[in-house]
Image (cartoon, rainbow, N blue to C red):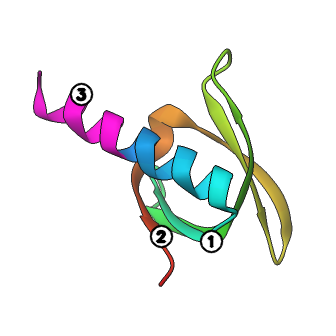
């Protein structure tokens, strides 16, 4: 298993656990203008179109799996 594949599995596991437990997460996102991050709750994971819906203080965002660099639970 490649490193990126292992990282993707770890990210998927953290997102699935966060969705089930309704725990806040910090998602680091790739952006050509400069990487960013969103802190919020996962409200939906869409495997078919490979994106996740995050609810946060400014509303909601759909984030493509391919744009996610890292995910961590908020302590």
* Disc 2 to disc 1: CB gap under 8 Å: yes
Precedes in sequence: disc 2 or disc 3: 3
From the viewer's perspective, tell me whether residue 57 is left or right of residue 4.
right
Q: Quadrant of residue 8?
A: top left
Q: Residue at x 60, y 25 (%)?
A: 50
Q: Nearer the viewer, mark 2 or mark 3?
A: 2
Answer yes or no: is residue 31 visible: no
Residue ID for mark 2: 73
Residue ID for mark 1: 24
Answer yes or no: is residue 62 visible: yes
* Disc 2 to disc 3: CB gap under 8 Å: no
From which residue to which does the magenta span run?
1-10
Q: CA distance from mark 2 to mark 3?
A: 20 Å
* SS under mark 1: loop
Q: Residue at x 56, y 68 (%)?
A: 25
Residue 8 in the image: above or below residue 14: above
**Residue 5's mark?**
3
Q: Quadrant of the N terminus?
A: top left
Q: CA distance from mark 2 to mark 1?
A: 6 Å
Residue 60 in the image: above or below residue 58: above
Q: Residue at x 43, y 61 (%)?
A: 35
């Amino acid at each position: 298993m490649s490193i990126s594949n292992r990282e993707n599995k770890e990210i998927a596991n953290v997102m699935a656990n966060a969705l089930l437990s309704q725990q806040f997460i910090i998602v680091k996102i790739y952006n050509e203008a400069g990487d960013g991050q969103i802190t919020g709750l996962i409200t939906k994971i869409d495997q078919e179109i490979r994106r996740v819906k995050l609810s946060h203080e400014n509303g909601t965002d759909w984030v493509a799996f391919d744009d996610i660099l890292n995910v961590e639970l908020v302590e």
